[in-house]
Amino acid sequence: MTLFERVFGGNDAVYGLTEAAVNNAIAQYGEGQAVSFPGTAYSLPCYYGVTGVKVETLGQLKEALGVVKGLMTRNNRLNDAFMSGVATALCAEFIEVLKYIGNDAPYEAPCYGHLPDAVVRSLGVPLVTGDIPGVPVILGTAPTADEAVALVKSYQSQGMLVTLVGGIIDQLQEKEYKTGDNVRVIPLGKDVTSVIHVVSVAVRAALIFGNIQPGDAAGLMKYTMERVPAFVNAFAPLDDVVVACGAGAIALGFPVITNEQENIFRVPKSLIVQPDVEKFNATSLEARDIKIKITNIDIPVSFASAFEGEIIRRPDMQVEVDGSRVDCFELVHTKEAAEIEDHKITVIGPEIDEIPVGSKISMSYTVDVAGKAMQPDFESVMERKFHSYLNCIEGVMHTGQRDMIRIRISKADFEAGFKFRHIGEVLYAKIKSEFEAVVDKCQVTIVVDAEKNKELRAAANAVFNKRDDRLKSMTDESVPVYYTCIMCQAFSPSHVCIVTPERLGLCGAVSWLDAKATNELDPTGPCQVVPKEHCIDEHLGRYEDVDAAVNKYSHGALEHVTLYSLFQDPMTSCGCFECICGVEPVSMGVVITCREHAGSTPLGMTFSEMASMTGGGVQTPGFMGHGKHFIASHKFIAAEGGPGRIVWMPKMLKDQMRDRLDKTAKEMYDVDNFTDMIADETICTDDPEQLLNYLSEVGHPVLSMEPFDM
Ligand code: SF4
Ligand code: ZN
């Protein structure tokens, strides 16, 4: 049988199953039954992306099936094979969505099934920075469970986001291998149709970040091919359905690597036979053109961003550094080059093997750096990275910062020979590689001694206080320049963030200091200086220089952007924003919600739905993505009256922002406990009248503001 016949055969088989399943569902629930995946604004994202039609009921799903049938032409063989692949994928999406009728969670642990929009958005930054260099989709059952583990681990240790479909999920369970989104190994489901859940992520990336218009199938496929670094590893034996799905993957630009050798033929760069599963990793990287940046770190356990979210539970813990009980801190300190011996790692006090298991200990680590281009302003930028560096060590968990850190080192690491000095090795290697443009010499001193740390901590706190004073004095007015960030252009080709001291990047990860450091480290990189010499309107935050910068870096897509307005040329959004605000017309206020909040808002929309109103680098007056910390800024929609316009936020976000927001509101409006005046889901969810009643009851400042000038 030829490959084409296998694709067509697989497609026909899936189509038949889908038709039967849809008819069955209609018989059971009726044509009016609503269908959608949960947590998405795109209903059936793949079908919507390809055709531009939003399917909302079973009746419409049946019509859509007719459209899919139309894709299943059998004339021009190569193109037809691709279209059959796409048709197969769409059928898979139909079969999967039926599982969600009357059941928001049809998948059981460890499988995930559908991944909500919030997950897609959270992947934006790690994908653009290359922190997640690729997305392997592993399908089927490996020759042995050991080979399954080895393959998954090989990708994981490169930081990849591994998705699994089929028998390999059981193989990992059999080996008690940890899976979950926190370790970047996501079992999607055991049926082959569950592969659509990763395709759905790729399609939504195009809609959310790429501003690809639904229905622009060609644009969609070009986007996924060029910008989504996914690829497929499919284990033999491949049945025709898998072959048909593979054709769909290839149509999206995702190469397929398989160890099947019979009845298959190779398509260069797209369908690759690699009989040796051990070589899947290398072959896949080459096919998808993924380069892994390696930092060699001399430690006895793995180091990869895939371990960043790993949790170490108490019974698995060898020792714990606990900054809430004993004196602990982490600090970067700039010194003269002569004072530093490069790569010197010193441990003062006992090593881990001299401490009883289960101890809570006092620890501090100070990283001394020197370099001609080093500036004390970069100390905090480096220090904030420690959290990620230490978490990337397999078997180590780090939380907190400054003098409120907590670190757990696992028993498994202890048994592998992990020592305190390895913390120093990690900090040294990462600082030297990531900050090589400013750090010429680096040494690390680790102190494991409660008495000494008490004294050292006091000195560290003096440094932290001084830094905070400097940060406080840094306002948009007090600095000479702003910065662009165009990191997200990898996914949102026309998006530009303008980063100022009082307005951080909308992802929440890039402050003005970060942007400044990035510019220093990589002068031709994503963060470029924006002068601020020609202010047109201070109130709106309109500058000739800002307009010129957005025009240049959006390649002409944008002409005007203001820094402080929600209505007049607001800043664009890429898609990875932490929060989104939108106008609430009844109270003339704004509603803010965040990725973590799944519920509705008084706009009658969830985060995903509000988020779908803007993105892809376009301006949408009335809706704007932003970082969490922008909420408490004096500059938050300052042109419209400032944070006093905020009328509703999820409770969790209120709690996170309370201290800073209360302080800002006191300064701006002279009101106390402003955060309590903001409604949340415990007060009202989607009723604007109820919201207004609450605002009147508490005397919310928005009530005395002018209506919006929309
Ligand atoms: Fe993307 Fe803006 Fe964050 Fe830069 S600051 S990473 S462009 S969201
Ligand atoms: Zn982004």
Image (cartoon, grey):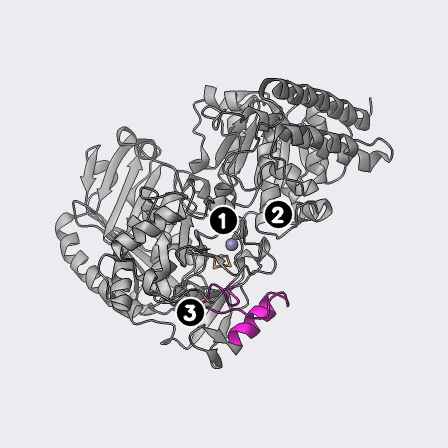
Residue 598, placed above or below residue 387: above
- Disc 2 target residue: 206
Crowdedness of circle 3 by 10 Å Cα count: few (<14), some, many (20+)?
A: some
Q: Are marks 2 and 1 in contact (CB under 8 Å)?
A: no
Crowdedness of circle 2 by 10 Å Cα count: few (<14), some, many (20+)?
A: many
Residue 230, placed above or below residue 402: above
Residue located at (22% from left, 48% from top) = 363
- Disc 3 target residue: 639
- Disc 1 target residue: 610
For the residue pair 562 and 75, the one nearer the viewer reads as 562
- Residue 222, can we see it? yes
> Label 1 amino acid?
Met
Q: Is residue 563 magenta?
A: yes
- Residue 240, can we see it? no
Q: Earlier in the sequence, mark 2 or mark 3?
A: 2
Residue located at (38% from left, 72% from top) = 476
Q: Secondary structure at mark 3?
A: helix
Residue 158 in percent (x, y) is at 51, 42
